[in-house]
Image (cartoon, helix red, strand yellow):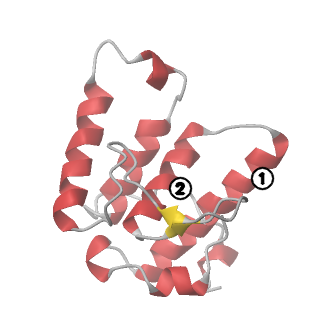
Amino acid sequence: MEVSATDIARIPGRNIHVPREDFAAVWREAERRNEVLGSRGDSAWFNAGVCVTCRWLAATAVRPPDGRSYLAPSPITRRTARAYEELIVAECYEAEKLSLRRPVPSWLQRRPGWVEGILATLDWAWRRNGRPPIEVPRRATVSG
């Protein structure tokens, strides 16, 4: 998914607690990596977790190749409501619960790093805790 300037401008300010430019750089880099990996037939579940979480926090429309856009669902509970403060807190809780589940659900075992990518993104963008979930090349930090 290409992240446009319009997508960035429409991010609800209350949904992120990091500078918008930093969030945009992480989101764009995650989407770029997703595209590169997908074109090679590879998957990186941590990066996918970052992508779906950024999309949801940004309350953006996902535009698949078939042209039917839809509002990005929440990454864990798959709620179709736009992200807002209380839902973000609830999603953080559900992500933490899932990460601690034992035994690990078989579907989650097949997605190594996915929930960790979601948690890392929520910790950074929502809780302002820690570093960005992925490293962004310096050129990507310039608004584009």
**Which image quarter is the C terminus in?**
bottom right
Residue 93: which quarter of the image? top left
In the image, farthest residue toward the right: 40
- The residue located at (32%, 51%) in the rendering is 79
Which image quadrant for residue 124?
A: bottom left
On-image quarter of the N terminus? bottom right
Visible residue check, residue 113? yes
Identity of the residue drawn at 30% across and 71% down: 15
| Residue lying at 77% horizontally and 52% vertically, measured from the top left | 36
* Residue 36: numbered disc: 1
| Label 1 crowd bin: few (<14), some (14–19), many (20+), radius 10 Å | few
What is the spatial separation of the Cα atoms under label 2 and label 1, in whole angstroms?
Answer: 13 Å
Amino acid of disc 2? Cys
Give the residue pinned by disc 2. Answer: 51
Q: Give the percent coordinates (x, y) of residue 109.
A: 48, 20
Along the viewing direction, whichever of 59 and 89 lies nearer the viewer: 59
Is residue 12 found left or right of 127 in the rendered image?
right
Q: Position of residue 142 (x, y in %)?
A: 62, 84
Q: Nearer the viewer, residue 72 or 112?
A: 72
Return the x and y of residue 49 as percentages of the image width and height: 49, 46
Q: Amino acid at mark 1?
A: Val
Q: Residue furthest top?
A: 103
Q: In the rendered structure, are the residues bearing label 2 and label 1 in contact, judged by CB atoms less than 8 Å apart?
A: no
Classify 46 as above or below 18: above
> SS for tag 2?
helix
Callout 2 crowding tier (Cα within 10 Å): few <14, some 14–19, many ≥20? many
